[in-house]
Image (cartoon, grey):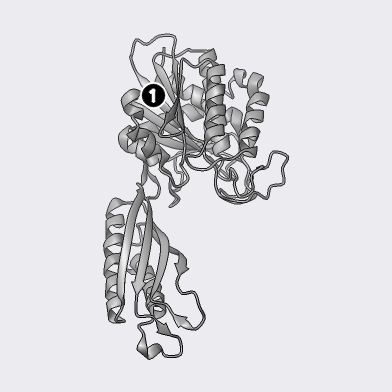
Amino acid sequence: MPVDNWVSGCLDELVTFRRDLHSNPELLYDLPRTSAQVASALRKAGCDEVVEGIGKTGVVAVIRGKSNISGRAIGLRSDMDALPIHETTGKPWASQTPGKMHACGHDGHTTMLLGAAMGLAQNRNFDGTAILIFQPAEEGGAGARAMIEDGLFRRWPVSEVYGMHNKPNLPIGEFTIAPGPIMGSVDMIEIEIEGVGGHAAMPHQTVDPAPVIAAVIQAIQTITARTINPMDSAVISITTIHGGDAFNVIPQTVRMTGTVRTLKDSVRDHVEARLNQAIAGIAAAYGAKGKLDYSRHYPVTVNHAQETELAAVAAEAVAGIGRVSRDMPATLGGEDFAFMLNEVPGAMINIGNGPSAGLHHPSYDFNDEAIAWGCSYWCELVRQRLPL
């Protein structure tokens, strides 16, 4: 079965909606326009319930099937927020807000789930309830966790939950998925080295934090290179260094920030412990003080095996055998859908975005040709998981 027939009748409307979202990007939880546009479109589509303000600016829509003999419900999730990036696509629907753009395709994800709402509400040939989750603040704000803490799964219990993300350079009409860990944990690190400041011409009267920082940066790279099984995955990246305000003053303190990514909780624990050891030990060797603030942000995204296969089968019904791979390589990029997968069995699938700049790139744009495929996948998934 190819793309659902009903999609062709509303595709122009969906493309217009997607491009409007793209032109008006909003960040994290600050989504007043985006959330209002989504809620309005869901009500127009005929959803049975539309609730706003879940997890600050999240939206939840409820669509009931022709029957409810099973009493089952499944969740479908998309994300809505943009990124603090200046867009360079030059397209007519490019961002109208300098410094903000939809550089990860959340405008497309939202549109595909909206299209599914239109299709499911129009033809309710399923038994049970579809819960459509439009989430804020995926890009670093843990919006999934906020919605859960605000009662998402208490108010709308589901037996399974599914997500979908676009994948640049995967052909349009193809899908890819894999069971197990598919995306890394996301942790933030802040390192402070405190020495003794003083005159740059008299370094012997100071404890210069600069060489301590240099030694720490060199040493922590050996954590991944020499203390972790090469068959496991881990990244430690230092991304900012701040210290000093004058060319002739040795600063008292230098601070660094960065990120740690892993695919196993045991590796995550190991990296945190070794970072603490390295920073304290190296600083002490130089006569300085070292402090690590390690913040666990997103957990590892782990697809459940059974739900992964169920998602793949639904995708094959839309795209065809041979156009859905089950061996998607894991990535150390993060995804807060992990919080939902820790609460409810489910899986995230990737949909082809065709030839494209990479995610989070200023020239990236979601490919509107993917919309019909994504809408059809969502509807087929509901029909298969909630059969009449």
Circle 1 packing at 10 Å, graded few (<14), some (14-19), many (20+), is many
**Left or right: 87 in relation to 240:** right
Instruction: Give the camera-side residue of 293 and 335.
Output: 293
Q: Is residue 40 above or below residue 137?
A: above
The quarter of the picture where the C terminus appears is top left
Q: Is residue 2 above or below residue 241?
A: above
Q: Does residue 157 appear anywhere in the picture?
A: no
Instruction: Give the camera-side residue of 3 and 370.
Output: 370
Residue name at image x 43 percent, y 34 percent: 56
| Callout 1: SS | strand
**Left or right: 8 in relation to 350:** right
Instruction: Give the camera-side residue of 14 and 166.
Output: 14
Amino acid found under the numbered disc labelled 1: Ile
Quarter of the rendering containing residue 168: top right
> Which residue is disc 1 drawn over?
74
Residue 202 point in image, percent of width and height: 42, 90
The quarter of the picture where the N terminus appears is top right
Residue name at image x 73 percent, y 39 percent: 92
The number of discs equals 1
**Left or right: 358 in relation to 140:** right
Q: Is residue 100 above or below residue 23?
A: below
Residue 63 point in image, percent of width and height: 45, 17
Instruction: Give the camera-side residue of 129 and 304.
Output: 129
Residue name at image x 52 percent, y 40 percent: 81
Q: Is residue 143 above or below residue 117?
A: below
Residue 14 point in image, percent of width and height: 63, 27
Residue name at image x 33 percent, y 35 percent: 149
Quarter of the rendering containing residue 150: top left
Residue 194 point in image, percent of width and height: 34, 74
